[in-house]
């Protein structure tokens, strides 16, 4: 995993400079003197990836007064060319000047990749996260020095005793564990979200949004379906080939679904010179078997397929084993799938996934696409065709679609799919977390306010928060980097601009993607309209460790802080509650939050002040 630690301070402030010197010494004692780093006036950036990256930085400027910061990660130039792009090794003076004079906006407009940029500009020092926030970016301030990092567990040089638990954030996590609002589980640490800029000046700091997916979607275009399919295919081929070009060997995690099959077969057709293989992690549960689809996709690509069984009763991490991260790790209780792969004989390996396709290619049965068509096209020639396709997609009659559409066309408020879905996460255990909960405070503005977007496109934009949360928050080590080629900005831009009814061409979910890749993936995969799920796997995982989970929750820090009730935990843990409901697997989420909370209570010694009263079920 790509990991970094950076320091930013005002080099003209003696106290800050003294503190920075102390922190730099502590970092070098922790990482060793040979760690790759960039050091400039008022700025230092360390690569603490394991193993270290071959080319972790793009240094901005040169020696002397032209020093302008650095970019950590991988950067590509945006282009209309269909071929794979090469990573940017350096920025020429003209490009750098444009980026600095724009305050960093030109970086997002002209380049893409997975990166965090550190940039000296006229207003101060800017830290910019790429739109997908591919690499986590957290920050804290200590005596005038800003410490910016991807993984707190790697910042052992920091004095953690001064950190305090953000109890309001923890309570909200019980309701919705994908919160993205800039807060973290620690009051002293903030998070820079995708496309945001942290501006550090002598007068203070502020967060500026440099990227807004609503603006991209509003600048949409409406090509004929065959042209949209051509562009979609070209863009997927480009981003897949681009990421593969930076790897010596690639294994594709092949779920058996359409998206990962597209990634594998595009990679096989890309001319990639390295070794390609496929792996299918097969859950040993009552979920529908996916292996026959994975075998068909691998055979179509001419690749070997490694099938790895994953048992739901595999060891559960102890409640006292959570690392000291800035927020609970959503993968804490999930199987470490990359860790199940055989070790590589040499470096440069990557595990590609198909994550992102659900959100970009549009997996939705909502009838809102017809409302978008009316709002954007009016009573045009294809009206009846889109109405019939929307009815087919949603499984409704045309009259039901019309009835649903008219209020939306009349301008009545449409609640985003992201916020509307929160109510479905309520359980007996977390019901009190919903009291007074404001969804608008949990998500970025672009996920809660339409700003002129039509309903279906707004739903697609709002659910990007779910897509971005699949990134890695904890450094798991290992010899393979996880790459999600579909979550690349050129594809994100294209799918945001294409109309919802075009993405659902033919009245099926991911209809345009099926049209674009009809000769790329096997028919068995192309024609399936259902998705594979692992819901039963996680409920079985709860069943295997039920007593450990219930005991930890009923006697732990969440209960001591009155955030959950032991009696309600026990009631929810009854077999007829968790075993028959999809929400039953959320006991794993609550257990992960409990484990994280205990880790920080041990570290800081800040336990709940008094035993909390017990809520009655």
Image (cartoon, rainbow, N blue to C red):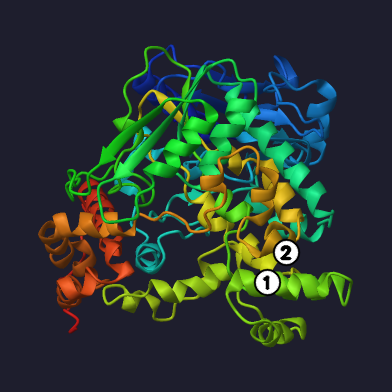
**As drawn, 504 above or below 489:** below
At mark 1, the secondary structure is helix
Which residue is the site of mark 2?
A: 501
Closest to the observer: 326 or 130? 130
> Is residue 446 shown above or below 130?
below
- What residue lies at 33% left-to-right and 78% top-to-bottom? 431
Quarter occupied by residue 568: bottom left
Residue at far right of view: 380
Q: Quadrant of the C terminus?
A: bottom left
User: What x and y, as percent, mark residue 522?
Assistant: 55, 40
Is residue 112 visible from the viewing direction of this image? Answer: yes
How many residues crowd around disc 2 within 10 Å: few (fewer than 14), some, or many (20 or more)?
many
Please state the horizontal and vertical placement of residue 441, each as a whole percent of the image.
Answer: 53, 69
Residue that badge 1 annotates? 390
Q: CA distance from mark 2 to mark 1?
A: 8 Å
Where does the image place residue 508, in percent across and percent down from the top left?
62, 62
- How would you rate the neighbour count of disc 1 (Cα within 10 Å): few for under 14, some for 14-19, many for 20 or more? many
Label 2's element? helix
Whether residue 42 is situated above or below residue 192 in the rendered picture: above
- The residue drawn where x is 72% and y is 44% is 232
- Location of residue 89 by image quarter: top right
Instruction: Compare residues 542 and 28 and report the one nearer the observer.
Output: 542
Which quadrant: the N terminus? top left
**2 and 1 marks in contact (CB < 8 Å):** yes
Q: Residue at x 34, y 47 (%)?
A: 331
Q: Earlier in the sequence, mark 2 or mark 1?
A: 1
| Residue 428 percent across, percent down from the top left | 27, 77
In the depicted view, which residue is nearer to us: 584 or 515? 515
Q: Is residue 273 left or right of residue 342?
A: right
**Closer to us: mark 2 or mark 1?**
1
Q: Decide: is 94 above or below 432.
A: above
Nearer to the camera, 444 or 163:
444
């Amino acid at each position: 995993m790509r990991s970094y630690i950076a320091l930013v301070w005002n080099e003209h402030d003696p106290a800050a400079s003294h503190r920075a010197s102390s922190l730099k010494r502590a970092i070098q004692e922790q990482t060793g003197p040979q760690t790759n780093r960039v050091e400039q006036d008022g700025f230092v950036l360390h690569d603490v990836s394991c193993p270290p990256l071959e080319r972790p930085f793009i240094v901005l400027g040169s020696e002397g007064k032209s020093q302008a910061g650095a970019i950590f990660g991988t950067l590509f130039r945006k282009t209309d060319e269909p071929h794979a792009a090469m990573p940017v090794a350096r920025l020429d003076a003209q490009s750098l000047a444009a980026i600095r004079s724009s305050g960093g906006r030109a970086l997002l407009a002209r380049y893409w990749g997975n990166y965090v940029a550190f940039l000296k500009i006229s207003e101060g020092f800017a830290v910019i996260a790429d739109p997908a926030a591919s690499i986590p970016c957290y920050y804290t301030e200590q005596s005038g020095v800003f410490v910016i990092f991807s993984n707190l567990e790697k910042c052992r040089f920091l004095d953690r005793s001064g950190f305090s638990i953000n109890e309001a954030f923890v309570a909200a996590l019980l309701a919705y564990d994908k919160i993205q609002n800039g807060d973290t589980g620690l009051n002293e640490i903030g998070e820079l979200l995708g496309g945001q800029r942290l501006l550090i000046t002598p007068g203070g700091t502020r967060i500026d949004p440099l990227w807004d997916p609503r603006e991209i979607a509003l600048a949409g275009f409406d090509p004929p379906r065959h042209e949209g399919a051509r562009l979609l295919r070209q863009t997927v081929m480009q981003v897949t080939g681009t990421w593969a070009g930076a790897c010596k060997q690639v294994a594709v995690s092949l779920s058996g679904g359409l998206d990962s099959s597209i990634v594998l077969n595009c990679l096989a057709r890309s001319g990639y010179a390295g070794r390609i293989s496929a792996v299918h992690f097969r859950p040993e549960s009552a979920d529908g078997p996916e292996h026959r689809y994975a075998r068909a996709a691998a055979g179509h690509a001419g690749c070997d397929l490694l099938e790895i069984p994953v048992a739901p009763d595999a060891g559960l991490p102890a409640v006292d084993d959570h690392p000291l991260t800035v927020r609970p790790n959503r993968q804490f209780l999930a199987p470490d799938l990359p860790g199940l792969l055989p070790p590589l004989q040499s470096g440069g390996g990557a595990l590609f996934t198909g994550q992102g396709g659900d959100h970009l290619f549009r997996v939705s049965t909502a009838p809102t696409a017809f409302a978008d068509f009316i709002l954007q096209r009016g009573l045009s020639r294809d009206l009846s065709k889109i109405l019939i396709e929307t009815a087919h997609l949603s499984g409704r009659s045309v009259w039901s679609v019309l009835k649903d559409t008219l209020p939306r066309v009349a301008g009545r408020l449409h609640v985003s799919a992201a916020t509307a879905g929160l109510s479905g996460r309520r359980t007996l255990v977390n019901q009190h977390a919903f009291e007074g909960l404001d969804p608008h405070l949990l998500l970025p503005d672009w996920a809660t306010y339409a700003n002129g977007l039509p309903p279906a496109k707004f739903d697609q934009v709002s659910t990007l928060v779910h897509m971005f949360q699949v990134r890695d928050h904890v450094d798991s080590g290992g010899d393979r980097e996880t790459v999600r080629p579909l979550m690349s900005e050129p594809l994100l831009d294209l799918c945001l601009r294409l109309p919802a009814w075009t993405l659902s061409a033919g009245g099926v979910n991911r209809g345009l993607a099926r049209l674009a890749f009809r000769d790329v993936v096997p028919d068995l995969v192309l024609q399936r309209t259902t998705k594979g799920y692992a819901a039963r796997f996680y409920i079985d995982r709860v069943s295997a460790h039920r007593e450990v989970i219930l005991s930890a929750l009923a006697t732990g820090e969440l209960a001591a802080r009155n955030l959950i009730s032991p009696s309600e935990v026990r009631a929810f843990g009854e077999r007829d509650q968790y075993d028959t409901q999809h929400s039953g697997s959320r006991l794993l989420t609550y257990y992960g939050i409990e484990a994280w909370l205990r880790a920080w209570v041990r570290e800081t010694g800040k336990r709940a002040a008094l035993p909390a009263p017990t809520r009655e079920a």
